[in-house]
Image (tube, helix red, strand yellow):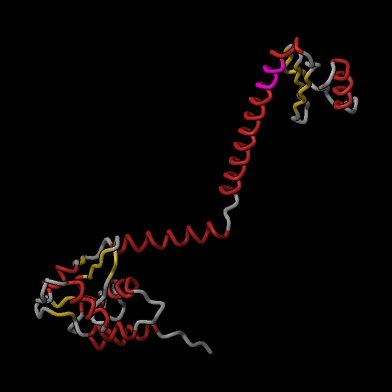
Amino acid sequence: MQTEENISTIVSEVAGRSDRAAPRRILNHEQLQAHATETGMVLVFIGDLIGAAHVSERRTVSRFADAAEAALSAEVRALADNYRKMIREALPSGRNLAVKTALNRVRVQERFLATLDMADQTEACELLRLSKSNPSATLRRKEERGELIRIDRDGRPFYPLFQFDLEAGQIYPVLRELNRMRPDHWSHIRLCYWLTRPHADFGRAPAELLGRADEEIVDAFRREIEPEIHG
């Protein structure tokens, strides 16, 4: 407990240099005083509350101290949270950049997939004149042999329609060769993109020529995936 006599001494010492403003009293409640310094520090002084005569004052001061501590803790947490948010927004970390890059890639893929006509498993079996009793097992065998391009969306398998020879009720045979040639870093989505974008060799998308210019498509794909050799 600080006495009234000590408060003046302590306050004057905190003020320090003569060119520094003296702490400003912000609260004066009976045996309780609070002073704010120009540096943002708050000094709280409690008078002599010893004895039975000051029981109620001690309770009041105790509640005030608890409330002040809780309020100060909340302010510090809010300040720290805002500071972290400011740092995140002003100085993106490498991880944030990586996440943004990954999200952009996913969004581009989703926009591309939205342009594709695709059949689900049951529809694919019907297009191939296959039994629809267990479409998952039926198509899995074709997928394992590399005969079919499968795209998963929202946890469900779909099959781009361009690979189906609807007249013959089969997958274009050249798809098996393209899948065999496909490098490990090429996903099915990337292969679909290559097949459905206009190609300089054909003046149109390779997918439009499946079943009619298969050798030319295989040659064009081989050139696409072969690494460039310089020197």
Residues in magenta, as a range: 58-63
For the image shown, how many numbered marks are present on the structure? Answer: 0
Q: Residue at x 87, y 18 (%)?
A: 8
* 59 inside magenta stretch: yes
> In this picture, is 155 found above or below 40?
below
65 drawn magenta: no
* Nearer to us in this view, 4 or 215: 4
Front position in the image: 192 or 146 = 146
Q: Residue at x 25, y 67 (%)?
A: 157
Query: Could you say where residue 48 lies in the image, as x and y percent from the top left?
Result: 81, 16
Toward which corner of the image does residue 138 lie, by quadrant?
A: bottom left
The quarter of the rendered structure image containing the N terminus is top right
Where is residue 17 shown, x and y percent of the image?
Answer: 90, 28
Coordinates of residue 79 in the picture (x, y in percent): 62, 37
Residue at (53%, 56%) from the top-left corner?
96
Along the viewing direction, whichever of 126 and 230 lies nearer the viewer: 126
Q: Is residue 76 left or right of residue 161?
A: right
Q: Left or right: 58 with respect to 148? A: right
Q: Is residue 160 above or below residue 28?
A: below
**Quadrant assignment, res 130:** bottom left
Tell me which secondary structure the magenta stretch mostly adopts.
helix
x, y percent for residue 149: 26, 75
Residue at the limit of the structure toward the top, as seen here: 53
* Residue with the most extreme front position: 52
Above or below residue 38? Residue 147 is below
Which of 221/56 is in front? 56
- Which picture quadrant has residue 167? bottom left
